[in-house]
Amino acid sequence: MKNYTLLSPCFFGMEKMLAREIKELGFEILKTEDGRITYKTGEDGIAKANMWLRCAERVNLKVAEFEAKSFDELFEGTKRIDWSKYIPYGAQFPVSKASSIKSKLFSTSDIQSIVKKAIVESLKKSYLEDGLIKEDKEKYPIYVFIHKDKVTISIDTTGDALHKRGYREKANKAPIRETLASGIMYLNPWRPGRTLVDPMCGSGTLLIEAAMMGINMAPGLNRNFISEKWRTLDKKFWWDIRKEAYDKIDEDVEFKIYGYDIDEEAIEIAKENAEIAGVSEYIEFNVANALDFKSNEEYGFIVTNPPYGERLEDKETVQALYKNLGYTFRELKNWSYYLITSYEEFEDEFGREADKRRKLYNGMLKTNLYQYIGPRPPKKS
Ligand SMILES: C[S@@+](CC[C@H](N)C(=O)[O-])C[C@H]1O[C@@H](n2cnc3c(N)ncnc32)[C@H](O)[C@@H]1O
């Protein structure tokens, strides 16, 4: 059986949740670094990881790792690899991305062109029947990452990044990344059957991710991946993984979760997105002011992504909103609430120190998930 070494980048702060997912899929973690995890899988690993990982940004197939402090070393190290093992005759192999941190080689455009030339030289040894390296078939995008002079070369198996689940055709103001939203859902103990509310739901991402997790719907079910077209990967793996993902949806689980927003247009978008995702029957969306939120339920969860102040509202509006949210949420005596914002003085405005806070990056933006943890409901006898 063939093994693959895969490499998945994630937002900073999401490593723990991604590691948990990777282990749950039965893969072996080889290395965890800031913003990426390397792991070993069996021969269906590329299809399985793309289909099921909720917190990863993409799945790359690791090809090589070597040291290079000069362009000569980069060229020779890349050429030494037998690229015909990865790239079949006629396939396209753009060097799509290069990044370099704390390294002698830093010009990313030069890195890209050297790596491209070196791969061409390597492939010529295998495919030079007509003197040309043709590139008119399926794509194998090459990624180069250099950290402290150590070069990692990988091939992107995903295509459009994994956060593009296929359901968010429209988004309201400042939507949260789908991958981050699912990471937040892993960080709280909500399970189907317990009450969940996002009172500032925007385009509905947190609740749609929660509902997908609630019915065990694979995040990749409604989209395609670049490596589905690869000749080097047996199509059977994709068919099997997709069929298995359909079979694994738990249609017997029953629950309702609730989303509100003050903006009518946001609620329309959220409804459409939930419909596309196939989870609309589990979520009720309505226009409402979060500050009016009340509930007869004694226990419940609020998970929300209020305006940050930087992008949406001015500072004063956000300060007043946070202060009033503090009053509103504290009326819900036994509830837990989880709020993500980049606003550093959030707890001062909200009027209560969080039980736990977790630093998470929303892209390049540093945010905190403020966690206020309520008591567990008594066990039903
Ligand atoms: C950062 S966005 C939420 C984005 C959302 N997580 C998504 O993925 O699309 C903040 C949302 O809070 C809403 N909002 C602001 N003040 C509100 C209030 N008082 N009550 C309800 N919603 C409010 C805004 O309309 C906006 O949609």
Image (cartoon, rainbow, N blue to C red):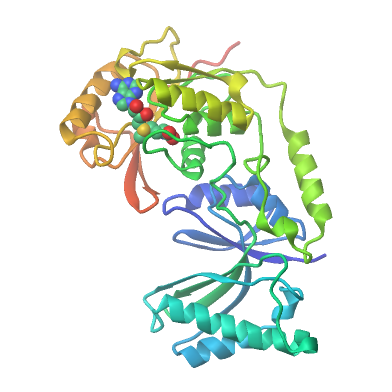
Question: Which residue is farthest bottom?
Answer: 72
Quadrant of the displayed image that contains ligand 1? top left
Taking the spot 25% from the left edge, 32% from the top edge, the residue there is 353
Q: Quadrant of residue 88?
A: bottom right
Is there any visible trace of residue 292 in the rendered image? Answer: yes
Q: Is residue 110 left or right of residue 291?
A: right
Residue drawn 26% across and 23% down? 326
- Please determine whether, in this image, residue 269 is positioned above or below residue 142: above
Depth check: give the residue in front, 142 or 189: 142
Q: Quadrant of the C terminus?
A: top right
* Residue 337: quarter of image: top left
Q: Residue 185, percent across and down?
A: 50, 35
Q: Exactly how many numbered labels are in the figure?
A: 0
The one nearer the camera, 172 or 36, is 172
Q: Nearer the viewer, residue 59 or 142?
A: 142
Q: Position of residue 188 (x, y in %)?
A: 47, 33
**Which residue is nearer to you in this view: 352 or 343?**
343
Residue pushed farthest left? 316
Q: Residue at x 40, y 79 (%)?
A: 107
Answer with the quarter of the image where residue 140 lies.
Answer: bottom right
Q: Left or right? Give the position of 362 relative to 273.
A: left
Residue 78 visible in the current orientation: no
Asked whether, in this view, residue 138 is left or right of residue 65, the answer is: right
Asked if residue 50 lies left or right of residue 365, the reply is right
- Residue 244, given in percent of the width and then of the height, sits at 78, 41
Q: Quadrant of the N terminus?
A: bottom right
- Residue 288 drawn at (x, y percent): 37, 15
Seen at 41% across and 38% down, the residue is 175
